Amino acid sequence: MATVLVIEDDADIRRLVADALAKQGHTVESAEAALPGLKAAVELRPDLVILDLGLPDLDGAELLRMLRAVSEVPVIAATARGEESDIVATLDAGADDYLVKPFSVAQLEARVRAVLRRTRSSAEPEVIEFSGLRIEPHSRAVTLDDRPLSLTPKEFDLLLYLAERPGHVVSRKELLAEVWRMPYGGGDRTVDVHLSELRKKLGESAASPRFIHTVHGVGVKFVEPEP
């Protein structure tokens, strides 16, 4: 099952799509305009975006270009624009599939299954394991010494980013850009708070680290504990 973000200004269509996908077991979030949709895509990191091109605040094609600048999330364009030139331009701009309104619920569900199957088979994340710590990117589950850890979405993203780079020193600026999608900095306190909470859940502290070590004046790095 997947987290799907529906960016659609028509409330009836938005509700229809959300209900249909929820019945298939997916978690569905929605936005009724382009800019809130972009914010949701960056913060939620969904597995799939269903994007209407006729949005009230910004053309969906422009939103697609903005989204592609910060994310590789699969996108299905679902729109009333059925001209071949629109379809070709949208696919060339980075959409993974294209649905012309009106479409049936069955057709939408089939397209969603196909896109998710394609993207997941081509880049299935591997389980990461270090000295009792097990991170499952696909299910976003973490266990430590066989005990499940309850992490917030951002704590999980932070842990995964560090664990994918063992021994690599990561600056706060890099974490803000890659985990928080804040390329202009100014959020060091945010990083420190999340690091502190994550360390508590890992049973460590900055003064007594197990996995996350501080490199003073530079950043932090993930280290596998010695046996």
Image (spheres, rainbow, N blue to C red):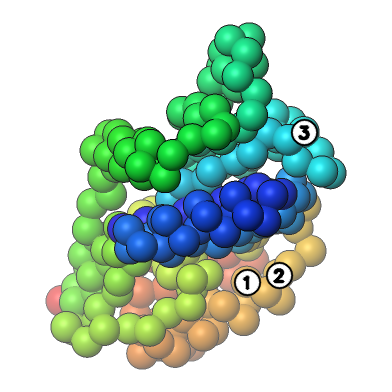
Q: Which residue is mark 1?
A: 191
Q: Dot 1: what SS?
A: helix
Q: Is residue 84 left or right of residue 118?
A: right
**Mark 3 or 1, which is nearer the eye?**
3
> Which type of secondary structure does the marked residue at label 3 adopt?
loop
Q: Residues within 10 Å of mark 1 (few under 14, many from 20)?
A: some
* Location of residue 121 with respect to 133 vertically, above or below: above
Residue depicted at x 57% and y 78%: 194
- Picture quarter containing residue 107? top left
Mark 3–mark 1 Cα distance, whole angstroms, equals: 34 Å
Tell me which label, 3 or 1, sits earlier in the chain: 3
In this figure, which residue is indicated by the disc labeled 3? 59
Residue 16 x/y as whole percent: 52, 55
Q: Residue at x 58, y 10 (%)?
A: 84
Amino acid under disc 2: Asp
Pointer 3 with pointer 2, Cβ within 8 A: no
Q: Does residue 70 appear left or right of residue 206 in this picture?
A: right
C-alpha distance separating marks 3 and 2? 34 Å
Check contact, mark 1 vs mark 2: CB within 8 A.
yes
Give neighbour class at mark 3: few <14, some 14-19, many 20+ (Cα, 10 Å).
some
Which image quarter holds the C terminus? bottom left
> Under tag 2, what secondary structure?
helix
Residue identifier under label 2: 188
- Residue pictured at 36% horizontal, 62% vertical: 23
Residue closest to the far right: 57
Coordinates of residue 126 in the picture (x, y in percent): 23, 52
Instruction: Say whether residue 27 is left or right of residue 62.
Output: left
Q: Is residue 81 left or right of residue 105?
A: right
The amino acid type found where label 3 is placed reads Asp
Mark 1: amino acid? Val
* 3 is higher (above) or lower (below) than 91: below
Q: Disc 1 versus disc 2: distance between alpha carbons?
A: 5 Å
